[in-house]
Image (cartoon, rainbow, N blue to C red):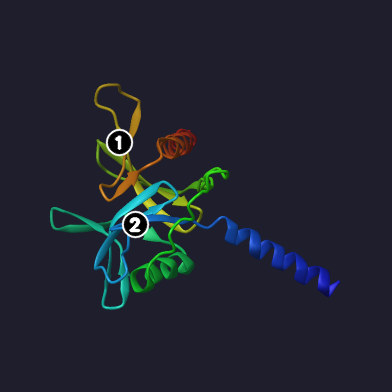
Amino acid sequence: MKKLLNVTVLCLTLSAGAAALEITGTVPENVKGAVKGDFNFSGLVVKNIAYEKGAVILPVTENKGRTYTDVKLLAKSLYGRIETCFKAGCAAPKPSGKDKPAAKIAVPVIKVEEFKPLKSKTRVANAEVSFDGELLAVVGVMASSREPGTFWLAFPETLEFKDESLKAAVEKTVNAAWAKNKK
């Protein structure tokens, strides 16, 4: 019975690691020794991640004297992979051979962790969206001035989508959660 339990725990641990965000590229291409870089996490790019004084520092937004954290790391393992890229370089994606198709990058699991209502008439809430439970982005839920009762999303400037289907999936997930939250 004890062996069965150990095997079950091992299988769950290995499957949890499979859902981790992959660093599929950086700008500059080799961030080893660089001060800042843009990191592509399976189609989601976080711009201006810095490495200063031995620490990974995520970008922030400043507006009217206030500082807002738009992107947060939720997992130590992702922090470690980013730090390793700055210290030793990232492993380059394996090129596909002529006979092999390009390796498909896993789409991250998108989850709305929380809505934080705001007192603004335009930005009515902040949605905290996690990707594979490792990276969190704060997305603004904006009330449309053209079409009352409709909403659109404002993504932080430091976040860019290289995969339009991933952006559409995020929008669909947040909009569905917002509609459910409003009921």
Q: Residue furthest right?
A: 1
Q: Look at the image and tell me whether residue 117 can be seen.
A: no
| Above or below for 30 versus 54 | above
What residue lies at 44% left-to-right and 35% top-to-bottom?
Answer: 165
What residue lies at 44% left-to-right and 37% top-to-bottom?
Answer: 178
The residue carrying mark 1 is 142
102 horizontally vs 14: left or right = left
Q: Residue furthest bottom?
A: 53
What is the quadrant of the N terminus in the image? bottom right
First of labels 1, 2 by sequence position: 2
Q: Look at the image and tell me whether residue 62 can be seen.
A: yes
Q: Nearer the viewer, residue 75 or 160?
A: 160
Image marks 1 and 2: residues in contact by CB distance under 8 Å: no
162 horizontally vs 48: left or right = right
The residue carrying mark 2 is 26
Q: What is the x, y in percent for residue 172?
A: 46, 34
- Element type at mark 1: strand
Say the numbered circle drawn on residue 171: none
Q: What is the x, y in percent for residue 128?
A: 40, 50
Label 1 to label 2: alpha-carbon separation: 31 Å
At label 2, the amino acid type is Thr
At label 1, the amino acid type is Met
Q: Residue furthest left?
A: 64
| Above or below for 147 versus 63 | above
Q: What is the x, y in percent for residue 72?
A: 37, 59
